[in-house]
Amino acid sequence: MLDASSTTLTLLGASGSIGQSCLDVVRQHLDTFRIQALVGGANLQRLVQDALEFRPACVALADDSQGQALETALAGQGIEVLVGAQGVLEACTRPNDICVSAITGFAGLEPTLTALGHTKRLALANKESLVCGGSLLMQAARAAGVEVLPVDSEHSAIFQALHQQPRAALRSIVLTASGGPFRTWEQEAIQAAQREQALAHPNWDMGAKVTVDSASLMNKALEFIEALYLFDLEPEDIEVVVHPQSIVHSMVQFHDGSYLAQLGAPDMRSPIAYALTYPQRAALNVAPLDLVTLGSLSFEAPRHEAFPLLKLAEQAWRAGPSAMIAFNALNEVAVSAFLGRKILFGAIAQVVVEGMQRCESAAITSLAHIQHADKSARQLAEALIPR
């Protein structure tokens, strides 16, 4: 158990949606948490603002082209400034009590692995770290004696429902999905959807990449694999259901037929705070859940024909680590092309499905192997992007 009176945090992905929600949790509990290091990608202005507010010992910016501007903005503040990929990794070596891993995508894997040797608890929001390097990450965490606590709302819900329950009592888990903005759309319309439509999520306020993944159900596909690692499950132990209201964040079924569900308003500050304060719960200024006003909760089966990436997650898991790395990399490249208006929405799944058919299996036993497999899959994806 951590000393709640003086808990130091390193925040990876400080400028993103999860990072900003995390800082708001800290802002509400300044007597409990102290920021040790802030790590950002390219949003210089946001990182500087946060550094001046929270006064971390160290700030790192991945975009080294803005390094001089960062140093100038923080000159005389007594804050160590690091830039570039190596600067990010160096920031991860600063000792802390909790490292919040919230960098989006594959880029978060190496910083997360680096941080494991310098923290006591990993609050994991970067699902791609587990999808691409799950065995490596979990082994490294065990070897270092680091707690791994989930930050994704679905996995936090499962973690909470399983609390102090014997593993043998678990029958299955139910991962809920909002269904995204295209839940009720005809398949042809989904195929032709454009950027603005995919980014119009009905419930959650997230970054662009995660929002597009939610629209394709790729986000749920990644969470499916994440749950397999976090809770030591097999694919047949997990059911995915669409829950449009995003109030039931996930459920656990036990062998006696009972279900335990965790409910709450769609606000990421709640699962973030739980990962930071576990086993306690911190008071938060979040909107209370008004069930009477809500009226009803509904659930439905996913439309696999319209959202093929969800089923592909199980195939990738069964095919092994290199397939899961390719699964993620193909999607990241395709989503980037979509956000850049180079392809329509339907082409994302086409690139991933075709790429998975072409990718070759390889032994994955190290970070170097993971990085090589990722690079190869990205090259394949680029070749598959329609011109």
Image (cartoon, rainbow, N blue to C red):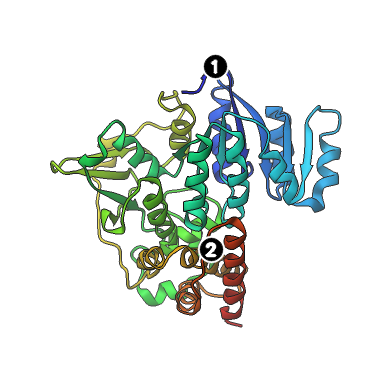
In the rendering, at what x and y percent does residue 91 appear?
70, 39
Q: In the image, 356: left or right of 338?
A: left
Nearest the eye: 353 or 269: 353
Q: Quadrant of residue 53?
A: top right
In the rendering, at what x and y percent does residue 19 appear?
58, 40
Q: Quadrant of residue 114?
A: top right
In the rendering, at what x and y percent does residue 155 appear?
38, 44
Q: Residue furthest left?
A: 256
What residue is at 84 percent from the left and 44 percent from the top?
Answer: 69
Mark 1 Cα-neighbour bin, 10 Å: few <14, some 14–19, many ≥20: few
Above or below, 99 against 102 in this view is: above
Q: Which residue is mark 1?
A: 5
Q: In the image, 268: left or right of 183?
A: right
Above or below, 375 against 144 in this view is: below
Q: Quadrant of residue 240?
A: bottom left
The kind of residue on which mark 2 rests is Glu
Q: Which residue is mark 2?
A: 196
Q: Secondary structure at mark 2?
A: helix
Q: Secondary structure at mark 1?
A: loop
* Quadrant including the C terminus: bottom right
